[in-house]
Amino acid sequence: MNRLIALAYELVTGTPYTTTRSAAAEFGPTPATRYPELANYTDAELYARPTADVLAEIRAQRAAAKRTKELTR
C-alpha cells in the first residue's frame, strides 16, 4: 500500500515521496527558541552552572525588563 501511495505521489507531483519527522513538532520548541538569551552565555558558563540557575536568571532579567517597560509607559 505504501509503495502505491509513493508511486501515485511521484507521478502527480514529479517529486519523490518522503516522510520526515519534526523534533520540534513532537517535543516542542528547543531551549534556544524559548530562551534566546542563552546565546549571551558561553559554553563554559552553561556547563558550569546548573540549568535551573541560568533559567532563573533569565526569567529575572525578563521580569525586570517588563517592569521597566511598564514604568516607562
Image (spheres, rainbow, N blue to C red):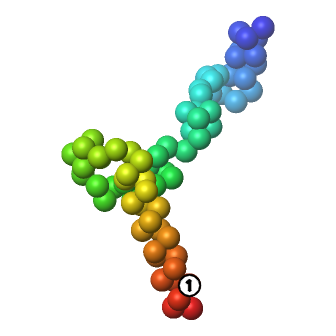
Above or below for 55 versus 12:
below
Q: In this image, 35 relative to 16: left or right?
A: left
- Counting from the top left corner in percent of width and height, residue 3 is at 71, 9
- Counting from the top left corner in percent of width and height, residue 12 is at 74, 26
Decide: few, some or many residues near mark 1? Use Cα within 10 Å; few <14, some 14-19, many ≥20: few
Residue 13 vs residue 58, the one in the foreground: 58
Residue 23 vs residue 9, the one in the foreground: 23
- Counting from the top left corner in percent of width and height, residue 9 is at 72, 23
Residue displayed at 55% across by 44% down = 29
Residue displayed at 59% across by 35% down = 27
Residue 48 vs residue 37, the one in the foreground: 48
Q: In this image, 39 relative to 66: left or right?
A: left
The mark total stands at 1
Residue displayed at 70% across by 16% down = 6
What's the residue type where badge 1 is placed? Glu
Quadrant containing the N terminus is top right
Q: In which quarter of the image is residue 39?
A: bottom left
Q: Can residue 36 be seen in this view?
A: no
Above or below for 1 versus 31:
above
Element under label 1? helix
Q: In this image, 30 relative to 13: left or right?
A: left
Q: To which residue does mark 1 refer?
A: 70
Residue displayed at 59% across by 26% down = 20
